[in-house]
Image (cartoon, rainbow, N blue to C red):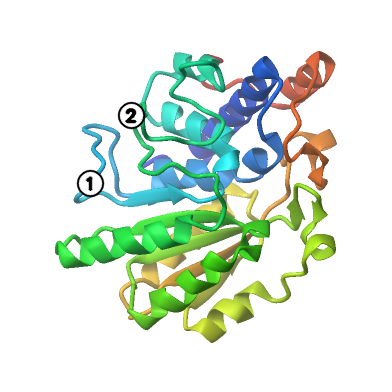
Amino acid sequence: MAQIPQLEKIASQVRRDIVRMVHAVNSGHPGGSLGCTEYFVALFNHVMRQSPEPFDMDGQNQDLFFLSNGHISPVYYSTLSRSGYFPTEELSTFRKIDSRLQGHPTTHEGLPGVRIASGSLGQGMSVAIGAALAKKQNGDDRLVYSLHGDGELQEGQIWEAALFAPGHKVDNLICTVDANGQQIDGSTDSVMPLGDIGAKFLAFGWEVMTIEKGNDMATVVEGLEKAKSLTGNGKPVMVIMHTEMGAGVDFMEGTHEWHGIAPNDEQLAEALNQLEETLGDY
């Protein structure tokens, strides 16, 4: 279980991986990936009870994670590789022909750590609920985690799942919403205002908590540990995590413009100059 200084070092390297991966193929989604870096690093290196070996799709006696907003695959792939799921050198194949690291996570190539194809927004919560129910039926006391974008909450399937989970007391589930206020076409408020997300889930019967500083590692770790303590009480747990899109690279922060655009050569150099190389570039 890595401690905060080590987690911060991993996060810096993951951010370097993200901008290098999308730059190399001039495609991908750096903004949300950078914003969720602390979450992923904390989850896989401190919070979840899991091991990269042996990996199988069932995940019995392992905590499970499902990425619903699959377009932020760069941070997912980097974290998996830096956590021992596959060699970091494979990050260089991101979005290339026949690569296991497609633009949205897929399962047909058998990439360790990935249990569902995702990117068709709105589906991940339903999958996570199914996995959590399976663990209950199998007598498996491990937890299920999922991550969602705030713009993704505009998908209707999310709210069907949000009704189902508390109705069936799926209390081994921790869902997190990346509340960065941005989506591909602009701010969430300008596209479709979401209102008080926490109040909505609370009204549906969830246990709701907030992580106000989603780009501060210590705060994220503390928040996720608190979320774990809320499980097992008859309700699913929803974490509203406030982040900054593009966090860690100053010219990418706080705007939707870097949702799905890769940096050019000059911008890559500027980004890397802001991010310490801590574990070695792939």
Which of 205/208 is in front? 205
* Spot occupied by residue 8 in the image (x, y as percentages of width and height): 56, 37
180 over 235 or under it: above or below: above
Residue at 50%, 38% (x, y): give it.
7
For mark 2, what is the residue? 110
Circle on res. 58: 1
Left or right placement of residue 256 versus residue 13 in this view: right
Q: Secondary structure at mark 1?
A: loop
> Can you name the residue that lies furthest to the left here?
139
Residue at 52%, 66% (x, y): give it.
157
Distance from disc 2 to disc 1, alpha carbons, whole Å, reads: 13 Å
* Spot occupied by residue 234 in the image (x, y as percentages of width and height): 33, 81
Is there any visible trace of residue 280 in the rendered image?
A: no
Q: Residues within 10 Å of mark 1 (few under 14, many from 20)?
A: few
Amino acid type at image mark 1: Asp
* Spot occupied by residue 223 in the image (x, y as percentages of width and height): 51, 61
